[in-house]
Amino acid sequence: MKIVVDAYGNDLGPIEPVKASVEAIKLYKDIKVVLCGKEEELKNLLSQYEYDKERIEIIPAEDVITNEEVPTEAVKSKPNSSLVKAFETLKQDEEVVGLVSCGSTGAVLTGAFLKIGRIKGISRPALCPILPAKDGKQVMLIDSGANIDCKPINLCHFALLASSYAKALFNIEKPRVALLNIGTEDKKGNEFSHECFAELKKMPINFVGNMEARDFLSGNYDIVVADGFYGNILLKSVEGTAKFVMDSLKKEIKSSFWSKIGALFMKKTFKNLKGTFNHNAHGGAAFLGVKKLVVKGHGASDSLAFLKSIEQVIKLHQCDYCKKIEEELSNLGEKENA
């Protein structure tokens, strides 16, 4: 199988995706990586490594789509950009099972929608990042920013996509699905929340009710469903809080001699804590609901984050995620028509 990587558009340039690609083919003997970007620069970077030359391919693309550009216009007007070339490769090459990009979020979502298309029966694809939760657990957030204005049916489809994702990736038989709200009571929230709550109860998922934002990382939920507007606010709030806690902890440790001495005895604990909050260690957010696998990484992703994103594509392909969600939607349609 092949995985195509957009080597440009991210904040740190092509060095990180190149390093990750070399590492990926060493770890996984049955994959090939296709790098899209500036050919000469990619060749120069690859020349610094010892690797199987037959397993990394370069697709020349001299243009780059930036975060400052209007996504739809950029995708249409820059056919020679690394991202557009990556999507064309994903669509046309049957051996390519998925794509990884850490470029413009809007451009990645636009490209996936226009070039690849959504799975039949899904009203809107959605971004689904995985975050660390209490006691070593994980929690998925869908949607985290792809769809700002949603209808209840969209959130129902989000829940179905993420449930299949959790089953495939973590072997969770009945993932616990919650609706982001301002309280846990059934009647909490605005009219939209009430409609979503009622519709989610009808879905063939393990819906456990409303969830307040403060319980997001409690470990009591496997999946949290929201529209992209509030989901993105929740995600950024968690990221900001984690950064504040780590920065404050570092400042306090450096504030006195005894704090520094105490920190020496907790060095391993702090290292583990830092690893938990490190977004690079968890890969990107899968864009669920499109016909092929697409993972969107953080703009500041390092080589570890790129590698984890590549691993996400591998795992989802190995468990045949796209086929499984199509089957679930087909079964759902048959039940509704019965």
Image (cartoon, rainbow, N blue to C red):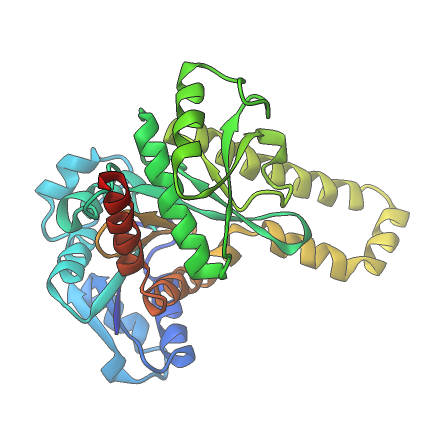
Q: Residue furthest right?
A: 258
Q: Residue furthest top?
A: 191
297 vs 30, nearest the viewer = 30
Look at 39% across and 69% down and name the residue there: 19
- The percent coordinates of residue 39 (x first, y second) are 18, 66
Please determine whether, in this image, residue 208 is positioned above or below residue 53: above
Q: How many marks?
A: 0
239 vs 195, nearest the viewer = 195
Look at 59% across and 26% down and name the residue there: 184
Residue 174 seen in the figure:
yes
Look at 39% across and 66% down and name the residue there: 315
- The percent coordinates of residue 83 (x first, y second) are 21, 52
Question: In the image, is 184 to the left or to the right of 47?
Answer: right
- The percent coordinates of residue 40 (x first, y second) are 20, 68
Identify the image quadrant of the C terminus. top left
Identify the image quadrant of the N terminus. bottom left
311 vs 241, nearest the viewer = 311
- The percent coordinates of residue 119 (x first, y second) are 21, 48
175 vs 92, nearest the viewer = 175
Question: What is the quadrant of residue 48 in the picture?
Answer: bottom left
Please determine whether, in this image, residue 48 is positioned above or below residue 229: below
Look at 18% across and 46% down and name the residue there: 120
Please determine whether, in this image, residue 167 is positioned above or below residue 191: below
Question: In the image, is 293 to the left or to the right of 92?
Answer: right
Q: Residue furthest front?
A: 338
Residue 7 seen in the figure:
no
